[in-house]
Amino acid sequence: MSAAPNLRLIAGGRRTIWRHGDLELVAAPPGEAPFPVERQVIEEDRWRVLGASPEWQPPPPEHPVRLLTALVFDTPAPLGRVLANGRRWHAMVVDLDSEPLVTADVVAAALAEVAALCRRHTVTRLALPLLGTVHGDLDPHRALEILHDAFLVTPPATLRRVWLRAPQRHQLVIGQALARWAEVCG
């Protein structure tokens, strides 16, 4: 009897591509950009905490009392809004004070704002997570339906390529959805 083969799992997998008219959607893991992007959408909560960079930065030169006063009088951002911060667009879709954390209509509203920003800034290449599933509790199947109906069926005219940042836990669901969309679109 021969020895068992020495098999190991290699992280990653093949990229999934879906084309619709002039638009190309590429699903790839977050750390493996399939092309350079002009803007990146970040899933954010109303208080703008979840989308903060994990990199340490020195404290601002502002006096601590002034900083504390600004925090005390800060108000939460409206759900569904997208705050443009340079190349990073923060989509306010998570409400940490409610149950469920994310609703479908909020994700659809945020995607509509992303589309408007793409048109305004003539963005051709965009990185986009599956909104509602990064920090929120939206079902990935439902998030994909919203993405398809609210953003991909009639995408902004300037947009040519979208990198759907697909974490390992959602790759199978995303691959199945893109295969279904390809069958429907022919």
Image: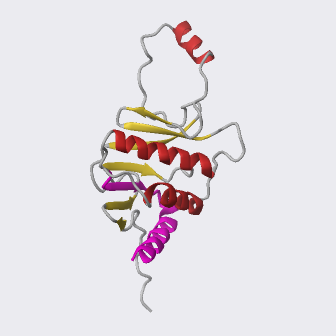
Is residue 169 at all visible to an observer of this figure?
Answer: no
- Give the percent coordinates (x, y) of residue 49: 55, 32
Residue found at x 53% / y 37%: 81
Residue pictured at 61% horizontal, 54% vertical: 138
Q: Count the marks.
A: 0
| Image location of residue 169, percent across then percent down | 52, 60
Which x, y percent locates residue 97? 70, 36
Image: 10 above or below 100: below
- Give the answer, above or below, for where 42 lies relative to 182: above
**Residue 175 magenta-drawn?**
yes
Question: Looking at the rendering, in which quadrant would you find the C terminus?
Answer: bottom left
The image quadrant that residue 181 belongs to is bottom left
Given residues 55 and 86, the one toward you in this image is 86
Side of 163 where 138 appears, left or right: right
- Going by the picture, which residue comes out furthest to the right? 99
**Residue 27 image point, x, y percent:** 40, 61
Image quadrant in which the N terminus is located: bottom left
Q: Which residue is at the far bottom? A: 1
Which residue is drawn at the image coordinates 45% and 10% (left, top)? 62
Of 106 and 50, the residue lying toward us = 106
Instruction: Please name the predominant secondary structure of the magenta segment in the image.
Output: helix
**Residue 140 image-quadrant placement:** bottom right
Q: Can residue 86 be seen in this view?
A: yes
Residue extent of the magenta highlight: 159-186
Using residue 128 as the reference point, say whether residue 145 is left or right of it: right
Q: Which of 5 and 61 is in front in this view?
A: 61
Q: Is residue 145 magenta?
A: no
Please tell me whether residue 121 is drawn above or below residue 165 in the rendered image: above
> Along the horizontal axis of the image, is 34 left or right of 51?
left
For this rendering, which residue is in front, 165 or 182? 182
Residue 169 is left or right of residue 32, and the answer is: right
